[in-house]
Image (spheres, rainbow, N blue to C red):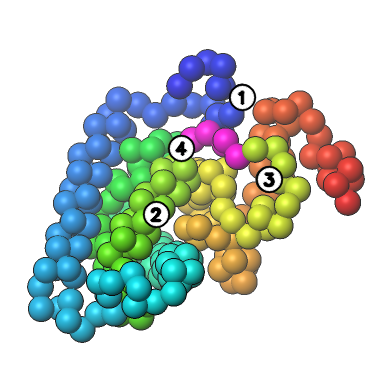
Amino acid sequence: MPKKLGKYKIQNKDATKSDYIREIWYSMQSTLVFTLIAVVVFFSPLRQYTLIYDHITDFPIWYMGLSLLLSLILHDTYFYWMHRLLHHKALFKHTHVLHHKSTNPSPWTSYSFHLSEAIVEGMVLIPIVFLIPMHPLNILLFTVAAFIINVYGHLGYEIVPKWFRFTWMFEVFNTSMYHNMHHSKFRGNYGLYFRVWDRLMGTEHPDYVKEYDRLQRQRFDTLPDQELNLHR
């Protein structure tokens, strides 16, 4: 990244060449796993038992947006509890530790998973298509949205605009800082898209807001508490 983006950087250290090589290799493996799962869902006899529909007119057009939102909520719930399970000491050292070798994540970290974790991650498509009527176009949109948000979470840079901190969205949605702290601290902030499950279950890292505000000062030379007073 250009030096001028340094103020957006969450951690001072950089990923190493060996980190990138490992992440790219396992990301390719995970992508293959995700593709195979999608092929099974769409082109095997399993499809007839799903709620996938072929004609957009089968549901009101607004349902496209609703089903996409529902799929993201379901994915976030699935991911949170799967993620908590993978952090159990009996599983972590055999699976999820590979992903956590990237203590300062980059976009390549996003899909850098152990084979067994990649399978479990990709299997989220099964409950989605069995519980939510989805058009193939929406499944594609879900996949693209999940990819973009995942890359943002592992970006290593905080790029959300200044005003985000002063809206209800900050209270609901994860940020790059949010997931970066999970990689650097190894505990807390287990959610994928939303802060909801972490806040409900008491697993949000207690220093998250403080660290986010520290980066805000680094980016904008503004004290967040002063700004917050102006927005009340």
Q: Is 63 drawn above or below residue 118 in the view shown?
A: below
Q: Amino acid at mark 1?
A: Lys
Q: Nearer the viewer, mark 1 or mark 3?
A: 3
Q: Alpha carbon of mark 1 to alpha carbon of mark 4: how far?
A: 14 Å
- Part of the protein shown in magenta: 156-160
Q: Is residue 71 left or right of residue 174?
A: left
Q: Which residue is drawn at the image coordinates 36% and 51% (left, top)?
A: 144
User: What is the C-alpha distance between the residues marked 1 and 2?
Assistant: 26 Å
Asked whether the viewer can see residue 77, the reply is no
Up/down of 141 relative to 77, above or below: above
> Which is more N-terminal, label 2 or label 3?
2
Q: Determine the residue located farthest toward the bottom in the rendered image.
A: 49
Q: Decide: marks 3, 2 in contact (CB < 8 A)?
A: no
Residue 81 position by quadrant: bottom left
Q: Compared with residue 182, is residue 38 higher up or lower down, i.e. above or below?
A: below
- In-front residue for pair 90/84: 84
Residue found farthest to the left: 44
Q: Earlier in the sequence, mark 3 or mark 4?
A: 4
Residue 146 — which label?
Answer: 2
The image quadrant that residue 17 belongs to is top left
Identify the secondary structure beneath mark 2: helix
- The answer to the question of whether label 3 and label 4 lie on touching residues, with beta carbons closer than 8 A, is no
At a point 14% along the width and 63% down the height, the residue shown is 39
Disc 2 to disc 4, C-alpha distance: 14 Å
Identify the residue position indicated by label 4 in the image.
155
Q: CA distance from mark 3 to mark 4?
A: 18 Å
